[in-house]
Image: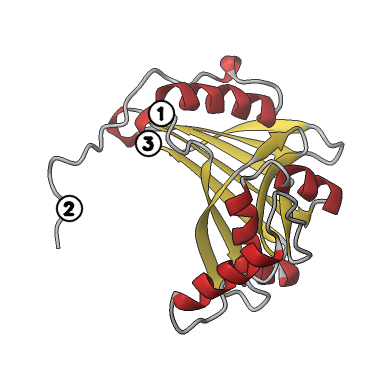
Amino acid sequence: MSIPKHIKEDFAREPLLPETLAAEPMSQFHDWFLEACEKDPDATNAVSLATASADGTPGIRTVLMKQYNENGFVFFTNYTSRKAQHLEGNPQAAMLFPWARQSRQVIARGPIERISQEESYEYFSTRSRGSRIGAWASRQSSVIPDRSVLEERLEELNARFPDEDVPLPDFWGGYRLRPETVEFWQGQANRLHDRFEYRRDAAGGWTILRLSP
């Protein structure tokens, strides 16, 4: 099979200059994220999360990044999911934000930790009732015979939690990736793209390095 010729592969835009970069990666991410949200607001916070099991079996999936600050990136999931099982045995992971329309991408790598139950509840309480019920209904990544299993669980849970007071499941919550490296990629002509990587140093600060494309 060949790739259709009309697919755009020209990523050229203005050069990314080191003197324009923020001193810390999360500040730089904030600037790029806001710009991406303005130009392409459809699921700009969708991120590819790469994990591996303790024996090295890889896994990747798209999750929604729901929070970020100087401590890193937060997403939420079921603790029975495959990604959660990977993280229990191997807490190292990577995130890729693919902003193709901006000819940009960001890659963060580092250890992942569970956030507190209080933090998880704070976010959980902002979700719609349907999403909160849905968190209870699915034992994520488990094998089920057909969709009727989910529909039956949903019916049972709607009867169990008839109003807006849906509690936080003990098998659901948030994780935070604390980046050790963050790479900012910006497309250029002739595949000579700009790549800058922030690396955390022993003192807790950041060193910025230009990488070859």
- Reading the image, the residue beneath label 1 is 40
Q: Quadrant of the N terminus?
A: bottom left
- Residue 25 visible? The answer is yes
Q: Please state the horizontal and vertical placement of residue 135, each as a whole percent of the image.
A: 63, 60
Is 71 or 129 nearer to us in this picture? Answer: 129
Alpha carbon distance from label 3 to label 2: 17 Å
Tell me what residue is drawn at x 57 percent, y 67 percent.
154
Of circles 2 and 1, the one toward us is: 1
Q: Is mark 3 on a helix, strand or loop?
A: helix
Tell me what residue is drawn at x 25 percent, y 38 percent.
9
Of circles 3 and 1, the one toward us is: 1
Is 17 or 144 nearer to us in this picture? Answer: 144
Tell me what residue is drawn at x 58 percent, y 49 percent.
95
Alpha carbon distance from label 3 to label 1: 10 Å
- Reading the image, the residue beneath label 3 is 100
Q: What residue type is labelled 2?
A: Ile
Q: Please state the horizontal and vertical placement of residue 83, each as a whole percent of the image.
A: 62, 66
Q: Is residue 4 above or below residue 32?
A: below
- Reading the image, the residue beneath label 2 is 3
Is 209 or 100 nearer to us in this picture? Answer: 100
